[in-house]
Amino acid sequence: MRVLLLFALLGVIGCAKDDGITRIQLWHQMQPEDRAVLVRVVEAYDAKLGAVEVEVIYKETEELRSNYQSAALAGLGPDLLYGPSDQVGPLATMQFVRPLDEWFGKDDFSRLDERAVVKFKGATYQIADRIGNHLALVYNKKLLPTPPQTTDELIRVGQEVTKDLNGDGVTDQWGLVWNFTEPFFFIPWFSGFGGWVLDDNAQPTLNTPAAANAFRFVRSLRDEYKIVPPDCDYNTADALFKEGRAAMLINGPWSWAGYGAAGIDYELARIPLVSSTGLWPAPMVSPLGYSINVHSDGKELAATVELLKYLLSDSVQQEFVEATGIIPSSLAVRAEPSYVSRPHVATSLSQFETGKAMPIVPELRAVWDAMRASYQSVLGGYLSPEDAAAKMQRDAELKIREMNE
Amino acid sequence: MNSERNFALWMVAPAAVVVALVVVWPFLYNIVLSFSNMSLLHIHDWELIGPRQYEKVFSDTSFYVVFGKTMVWTVLNVFFHVTIGVALAVILHENVPGKRLFRTLLILPWAIPAVVTALTWRGMFHYEYGAVNLILTKVFAQTPIQWLNDPLGTFAACVITNVWLGFPFMMVVALGGLQSIPKELYEAAMIDGASAWQRFKTITLPMLVPVLMPAVILGFVWTFNKVDIVWLVSNGGEPADQTHILVSYVYRAAFNLYRYGYAAAGSMIIFLLLVLFSVTFMRRMRAKQGA
């Protein structure tokens, strides 16, 4: 009898709710300003439909990627996944995301920027609600009325505004700050010196004079010209700029609204042209968008497809634009006079035009890994720029081989 | 009697099922994966390939470098956890003024989430604006240290952070142990004219060892696997991937390079190393106690 009671109790606890509501889950990595909009539009969607309940879960980008991998491997995970396009290659290779061509066709895509439709080996695995994700120069107009156009100017004005304001021997105001230990933030300089990460066959192209020259240049900004702080990660750069203690910053669209909110009178500009090569730095540009879990099925899958259509709609993109100033994937929203006249849009688009598409192949993971170690070795003074370029090429090739075993 | 036993078994059953699902099954699955070629290209069609992944781990020189760092990391941390923890416990066991307040304050590091601790300390180790260098330069007139740009500095920063986080546990364990030591022993020793150091060496320490032994084993295993502090303070292994312990090394193999079979073999090696340490340590301690 007791045993029966126990089973009955466990049965009651274990029963899934069957109240006619379809529950779907969305994992994303949006920044706080975007996150608030996402929650708002999803709540409106839930309220409108009534029979669908969307659970929105935030995860930091790397956490999102590793958690999704683990969950999908176990046949679980969210129905809908939002993130940058570079995750598409690995996830599609591992068959963790569904091709979307069954539900989305030319008519749907024709209203979007073609770069928003992320294809891998012929199939569409991600549709973006925004494109860009590109780094740009952000400058504090109070400290620097006009942005530099070339790297020579950057150094000159950087030195002018780098100051010890109270004479205690410690620099209080910096010319330029950015997360210079992270390879993603090194790409504009790498490309500005004529380099790029992978060739058309997804083979690394890191051991080049461009890499060595770019390493040397970044190091000189810190050690020779002393316009960047000796120790500057993302949070330090962000804090210094928000406190008005840095005249220029290199950061992406996810951060810009935060500087306005912090009371900084800022404007965007292109990252300065590299004087010695005459090339504009090309930050990596990538769409940010939605993919559907391969394990989403039945009525959850149907509801997920509908939710995705809603999240890609002009009205939702308009809400994001108004709150955060993204470059929407919808051509109609982008053509709106209210969008074009928004502050920072023209300058953001100007930087976007110099950008280069981020590769979505899995090999990029190996490249990031290989670059990080060598790049930081140059900054730390353990390797010469030439040796570091050679080492990162060797490491990338080895990691790609290991990855493809 | 029999029905009582059955009832107890049924009561334990749900917990046993949960443990089987979240501990036993993943562990067995991991063993299988460690003998497989599961990777980016063989995520669904993986097959068993024998001990090849173990051979790869053992033939990788970076594994030995990281293993060496992990051992130094673990031994340093456990040493400082125990010495600081026991020293503070001995002080707090005496009738010092403000004993309760100090006890609460000293337990605080343990109560703060490790993520908060790690990120706070990372900020404090900042070259220019961090509290540590500001104290060094302004108070002690020393040159600032490149804590987070230098491999040794970063490693030291990780150790300092983890020592701060870990000593309260040993202090609490030692305090519990001290309360169980009969006062008569100290009284007899004092009558015999034993100094404070002699009393500590011949009474306190031997009586604390049985209490501290399980805590030291736990501390060793926890510290060996303490990836969060290393990862957050060093910002993922910076500089130049020089600040890794075995667990973060395995994590990168699995989640950055999708080498699941290799990572599973690495994690099994970590497990076996820890089992070997725990068994050896316990045997030695038992032998010492028996002697």
Image (spheres, coloured by chain):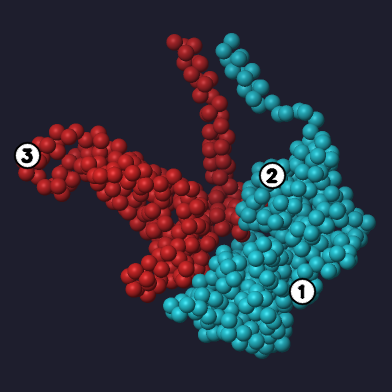
Chain colours: A cyan, B red
Q: Position of residue A18 (x, y in %)?
A: 76, 28
Residue A206 can be seen in this image: no
A85 shown above or below A265: above
Relative to the observer, which residue lies in front, A283 or A245?
Answer: A245
Quadrant of the frame with the N terminus of chain B: top left
Point 43% across, 59% down: residue: B158
**Residue under pointer 3:** B191
The chain holding disc 3 is B
Residue A318 can be seen in this image: yes
Report the mark closest to the observer, 1 or 2. Answer: 1
**Residue under pointer 1:** A347
How would you rate the neighbour count of disc 1 (Cα within 10 Å): few for under 14, some for 14-19, many for 20 or more?
some
At label 1, the amino acid type is Thr
Residue B184 relative to residue A140: left or right: left
Q: Position of residue B233 (x, y in %)?
A: 48, 60
Which corner quadrant of the image does residue A71 belong to? top right
Residue A240 relative to residue B126: left or right: right
The chain holding disc 1 is A
